[in-house]
Image (tube, rainbow, N blue to C red):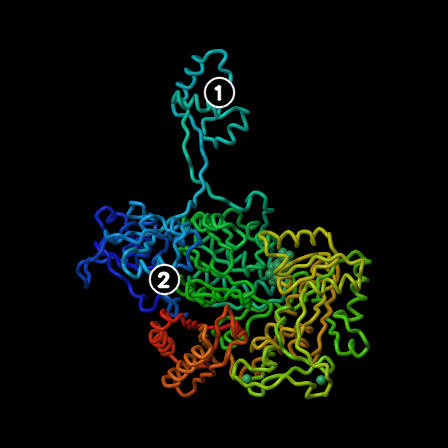
């Protein structure tokens, strides 16, 4: 078995295959599947993953593996298989899928070198650069006066080659430990022998006679108020020894968590958890959709199910959306399971993330709570996978590989024969439809555990405000309520639904929104051409001067920023103190938490923010929630816009009156009759589901069909359009009858970074060969892509259409 099959780190087409390498003698005993290696590839050395070992190869003259990066495999065989599946599902490169499973620090950095390839005289500037050496660091070139063109030419002429070296970063933290290096009685003798003046040395020896355990040097010095010097003398006398140990950076102090115990479940909870526990006990795989209003005790169900899994000696993965991975959420898991829990989220430093990952890899924890990528936790005996707030779109990665964590969870759940729980107060239509069909098992929690009613929601028609002469963004009612709230010393959450910063067009008099006659989707305003366009089907028309419904000339495109709202708010209610939370104020690491803490400590009356304030927050003193523009998301060019509006309104309403004080919600809108606003105000998920399913059926959107989105981009507009047209024609030739290919149409944001983007959408019910057609198309354009910088991206489960 001296041949390794290696997947190399070159994400170009047709390199989904493995390459064979000889395993040198010195690695034969240690090399195993899942390790990362360095291999020669053409003139370069690159990283790769060993995916198999064999004794035969179809090729002769194999090259040798140059180096081995891991002594324990970075990936298990299960994860290697999973990567293959993910790559295939998402039409990505296998190597990219594998890389996505590893913590950042293991995605090796490349160090570049310039290698002289010829003995003949080089141009003087290059001779000077190399000054007699054969290999120099790439940085030397970067610091020189030589132009990229000159270097490129030398490379093209074959005089110089650029090589890549993998430089592994320092990823481990070490501390120095001090311990006795002799038997204690020898230490005792030495103590007697010391002169009277050697007080400090005596004190140290005395310490170790009483405490023979090794101790961290830093602690020792602190505790004894002694010096490094003294320690060193005793080390030199071989009485003490010092050595390094690796420590983990645990970002959480496990002792600081208030430990909790299992609550006695309510009847509803009992019914919901029973089949999950049966799954666990019998190693069965089912997907459960846990549909429960906010505060209905879903998390307690997760905790008790995980307890069963731990008792069984197995492991649990819990996914929560990045934004709700707050200390509050972490507390609940650490509080129940203490140091058995690893936490993975983006606020951790790369080193901290790596440490948490290794604690999982070494089986030092049994539970991981984390954002999307925690689905790849290298556990080997998974007993349950939980996805909280399953409707959140952050579970979909918007980068290669464009996977959805839910799909990966279900795949792993099958492999490990364990239950997968999807929890939400507002499940996606896709999941709920599957539950209706019996593909998933549905469990419902209809009541809050404290038996409190959900807060009253009142809808305010902003058209009436306008007609009454109020041109501000705040209705009179909301203003009064805010003032009243501040007087009582209670707090307010204001949501500005800013995803709608985009550009739909609406009449401020009657609320009419221009929609595409063929797609039931708001038209997008294109400022440059002053046109309205449908980005699903290419329909377009000029921007109207007057509203086609009521002839008012107050037809405008929409958008408001948080900063402007804050200004307006403090002008309107000068006594209000406001904390603003949006992408601008939360860019810095930790600022998100800091602002929330300030609000929790009542340093401000009002928390004003975008979507990010809607999730998971739990403030007892908040009694009023205001939604400033409920409809701004409703008219995005996205067939999920009603669903997202419904979800957001439901989530944000749940923020009020969580505890003793009753809550109230005010929703401002220009379209009070829209079903997603009306039904969200009544917390009526079931009717919303039925209504929305009808729309999806009529216009043929998921869950009735599957979608795939191809985006073609190029610096030259004509090139982009023509390529897109060719691709559509190729697809049309291959697909089955009931599959629809729409486009090409310009992406809503046509030009990004000087590239023109065109897209085509595929709607299909059953198209088993689709992925292979798309792969063929990618192969066909591979050469052109590389040479002419043409970019074709494939999204097999699109959530963003911009
Ligand atoms: P969800 O996750 O559905 O929003 P939580 O699990 O956060 O709901 O529960 C809401 C509150 O109810 C929490 O404070 C939790 O401690 C409490 N709770 C949950 N289950 C029970 C129970 N069986 N008995 C009493 N309190 C409970
Ligand atoms: Zn109108
Ligand atoms: Zn259209």
Q: Residue at x 75, y 78 (%)?
A: 463
Image coordinates of residue 328 in percent, x first then y, are 61, 53
Q: Residues within 10 Å of mark 1 (few under 14, many from 20)?
A: some
Task: Note whether 259 is above or below 778 in the view shown.
Answer: above
Q: Which residue is mark 2?
A: 95
Residue 690 in view (yes/no) = no
Image coordinates of residue 10 in percent, x first then y, are 34, 62
Position of residue 386 in the picture relative to residue 776 (left or right) = right
Tell which quarter ligand 2 is in. Answer: bottom right
From the Cβ of disc 1, is ligand 1 less than 8 Å away? Answer: no
Which quadrant would residue 673 be assigned to in this image?
A: bottom right
Disc number lying in front (1 or 2): 2
Position of residue 574 in the picture relative to residue 137 (left or right) = right
Find numbered disc 2 in the image and state the secondary structure of the residue it sits on: helix
From the Cβ of disc 2, is ligand 3 less than 8 Å away? Answer: no
Residue 794 in view (yes/no) = yes
Find numbered disc 1 in the image and state the secondary structure of the residue it sits on: helix
Tag on residue 315? none
Which quadrant would residue 182 be assigned to in this image?
A: top left
Image coordinates of residue 412 in percent, x first then y, are 41, 63
Q: Residues within 10 Å of mark 2 (few under 14, many from 20)?
A: many
Q: Which residue is mark 1?
A: 206
Position of residue 214 in the picture relative to residue 135 (left or right) = right
Q: Residue at x 48, y 80 (%)?
A: 705
Q: Earlier in the sequence, mark 1 or mark 2?
A: 2
Image coordinates of residue 542 in percent, x first then y, are 61, 85
């Amino acid at each position: 078995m001296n041949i390794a099959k290696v997947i190399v780190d070159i994400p170009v087409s047709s390199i989904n295959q493995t390459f064979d390498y000889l395993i040198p003698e010195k690695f034969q005993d240690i090399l195993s599947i899942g390790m990362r290696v360095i291999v020669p590839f053409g003139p370069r050395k690159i990283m790769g993953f060993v995916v198999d070992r064999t004794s035969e190869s179809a090729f002769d003259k194999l090259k040798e593996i140059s180096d081995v990066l891991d002594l324990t495999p970075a990936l298990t065989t299960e994860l290697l298989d999973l990567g293959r599946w993910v790559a295939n599902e998402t039409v990505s490169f296998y190597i990219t899928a594998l890389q996505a499973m590893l913590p950042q620090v293991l995605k090796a950095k490349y160090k570049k070198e310039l290698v002289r390839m010829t003995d003949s005289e080089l141009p003087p500037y290059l001779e000077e650069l190399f000054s007699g050496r054969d290999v120099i660091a790439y940085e030397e070139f970067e610091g020189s006066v030589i132009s990229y063109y000159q270097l490129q030419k030398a490379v093209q002429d074959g005089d110089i080659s650029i090589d890549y070296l993998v430089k592994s970063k320092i990823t481990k933290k070490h501390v120095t430990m001090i311990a006795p290096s002799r038997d204690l009685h020898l230490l005792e003798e030495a103590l007697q022998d010391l002169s009277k003046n050697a007080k400090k040395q005596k004190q140290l020896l005395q310490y170790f006679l009483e405490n023979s355990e090794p101790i961290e040097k830093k602690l020792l010095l602190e505790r004894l108020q002694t010096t490094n010097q003294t320690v060193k003398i005793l080390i030199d006398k071989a009485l003490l020894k010092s050595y390094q140990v690796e420590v983990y950076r645990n970002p959480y102090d496990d002792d600081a968590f208030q430990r909790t115990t299992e609550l006695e479940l309510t009847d509803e909870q009992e019914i919901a958890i029973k089949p999950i526990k049966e799954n666990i006990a019998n190693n069965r795989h089912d997907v459960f959709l846990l549909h429960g209003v906010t505060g209905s005790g879903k998390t307690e169900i997760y905790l008790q199910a995980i307890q069963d899994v731990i008792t069984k000696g197995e492991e649990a993965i819990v996914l929560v959306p990045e934004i709700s991975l707050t200390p509050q959420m972490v507390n609940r898991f650490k509080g129940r399971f203490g140091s058995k829990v690893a936490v993975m989220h983006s606020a951790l430093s790369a080193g901290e993330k790596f440490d948490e990952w290794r604690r999982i890899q070494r089986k030092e924890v049994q539970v991981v709570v984390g954002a999307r990528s925690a689905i790849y936790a290298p556990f080997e005996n998974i007993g349950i996978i939980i996805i909280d707030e399953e409707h959140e779109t952050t579970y979909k990665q918007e980068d290669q590989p464009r996977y959805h964590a839910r799909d990966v969870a279900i795949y792993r759940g099958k492999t490990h024969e364990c239950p997968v729980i999807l929890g939400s107060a507002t499940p996606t239509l896709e999941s709920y439809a599957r539950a209706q069909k019996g593909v998933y098992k549905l469990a419902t929690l209809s009541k809050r555990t404290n038996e409190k009613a959900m807060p009253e929601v009142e809808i305010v028609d902003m058209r009436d405000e306008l007609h009454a002469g109020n041109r501000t963004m705040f209705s009179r009612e909301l203003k009064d309520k805010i003032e009243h709230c501040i007087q009582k010393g209670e707090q307010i959450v204001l949501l500005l639904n800013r995803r709608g910063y985009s550009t739909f067009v609406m009449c401020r008099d009657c609320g009419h929104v221009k929609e595409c006659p063929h797609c039931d989707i708001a038209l997008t305003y294109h400022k440059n051409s002053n046109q309205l366009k449908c980005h699903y089907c290419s329909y377009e028309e000029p921007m109207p001067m007057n509203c086609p419904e009521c002839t008012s000339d107050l037809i405008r495109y929409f958008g408001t920023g948080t900063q402007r709202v804050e200004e307006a708010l403090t002008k309107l209610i000068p006594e209000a103190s406001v904390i603003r939370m949006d992408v601008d104020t939360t860019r810095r690491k930790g600022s998100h938490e800091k602002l929330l803490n300030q609000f929790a400590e009542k340093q401000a009356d009002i928390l004003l923010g975008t979507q990010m304030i809607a999730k998971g927050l739990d403030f007892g003193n908040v009694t009023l929630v205001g939604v400033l523009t409920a409809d701004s998301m409703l008219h995005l060019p996205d067939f999920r816009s009603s669903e997202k509006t419904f979800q957001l309104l439901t989530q944000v309403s749940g923020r009020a009156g969580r505890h003793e004080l009753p809550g109230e919600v005010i929703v401002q809108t220009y379209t009070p009759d829209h079903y997603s606003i009306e039904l969200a105000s009544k917390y009526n998920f079931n009717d919303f589901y039925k209504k929305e399913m009808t729309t999806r059926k009529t216009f043929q959107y998921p869950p009735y069909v599957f979608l795939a989105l191809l985006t073609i981009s190029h610096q030259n507009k004509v090139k982009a359009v023509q390529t897109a047209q060719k691709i559509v024609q190729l697809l049309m030739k291959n697909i089955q009858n009931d599959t629809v290919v729409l486009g090409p149409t310009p992406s809503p944001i046509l030009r990004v970074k000087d590239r023109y983007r065109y897209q085509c959408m595929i709607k299909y019910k059953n198209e088993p060969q689709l992925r292979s057609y798309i792969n063929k198309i990618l192969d066909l354009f591979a050469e052109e892509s590389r040479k002419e910088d043409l970019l074709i991206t494939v999204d097999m489960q699109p959530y963003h259409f911009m």
